[in-house]
Image (tube, grey):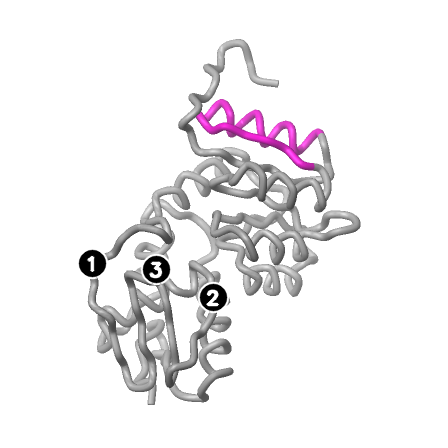
Amino acid sequence: MMSAMSPAPVASAPHVLVVDDETVLAGMVANYLQRAGFRTSVANDGITAVERALADAPDVVVLDLGLPGMDGLEVCHEIRRHSDCYIIMLTARNEEQALLVGLSAGADDYMTKPFSARELVARVQVLLRRPRADRVVEEPVREIGALRIDPAGRRVAVNGTDVDLTRTEFDLLGVLSARPNTAFTRRQLVDAVWGEDWVGDEHLVDVHIGHLRRKLADVADLPFVDTVRGVGYRMGAGG
């Protein structure tokens, strides 16, 4: 419950759905987000989380990976079938492999328990400053070898075959393809995609780049994204 000193969030405030089977923790997180000006709702199991995500169209979902029954990975997959909302995944320290799968399923960011509520609020604020997927982008189609990138339609194709990318994968590809001869450091990619205020493990970039490469390679095994040793990543020739 909100403190008497905390003003109620306005109806137009971004909506955050908090999903965690630890009811006390979920309530505390929701309360902290409310005090930061967000509207919040809470779900304590996967089925309820999916129902509320589809019914209420939250802007951000804070999703615990270790849910009973329908776990966080299944919830993430199901939400992604219908929604392009931001997803922050919460994980225990021994869930690294499942976390990688979660990022591949469409999560935008992650935090490891125990975490700082203040940092979580900051992560939510950073994500909401990212351009929305439905924003009209007045940029021409880019063609790099076999790769075709449509910034306005947020579509990617290789040799005419569409490639289904997550929001974050598309944004990373967009940054790299806008300056194909430039080698970007992890920090530069973080600043461009997550925002300069983002604080966390910059190796998150490696995970998303890895998923991006695999999805492109599934269509055509070509050097779309090169690793620049000691620096970061650069757009490849793409065939």
Quadrant of image for the C terminus: bottom left
Quickly name the residue at label 3. 187
Residues at marks 3 and 1, CA–CA distance in whole angstroms: 26 Å
Residue at image position (34%, 43%) is 129
Q: Where residue 30 sits: x, y (%)?
A: 58, 29
Q: Amino acid at mark 1?
A: Glu
Q: Amino acid at mark 3?
A: Arg
Q: Amino acid at mark 2?
A: His
Residue at image position (54%, 30%) is 40
Quickly name the residue at label 1. 138
Q: Is residue 203 above or below residue 163?
A: above
Residue at image position (43%, 60%) is 168
Looking at the rendered structure, which numbered label has been put on residue 127? none
What segment carries the magenta color? 24-43
Residues at marks 2 and 3, CA–CA distance in whole angstroms: 14 Å
Q: Is residue 66 left or right of residue 76?
A: right
Q: Where residue 224 sits: x, y (%)?
A: 37, 81
Seen as rendered, the residue at the extreme right is 69
Secondary structure found at label 1: loop
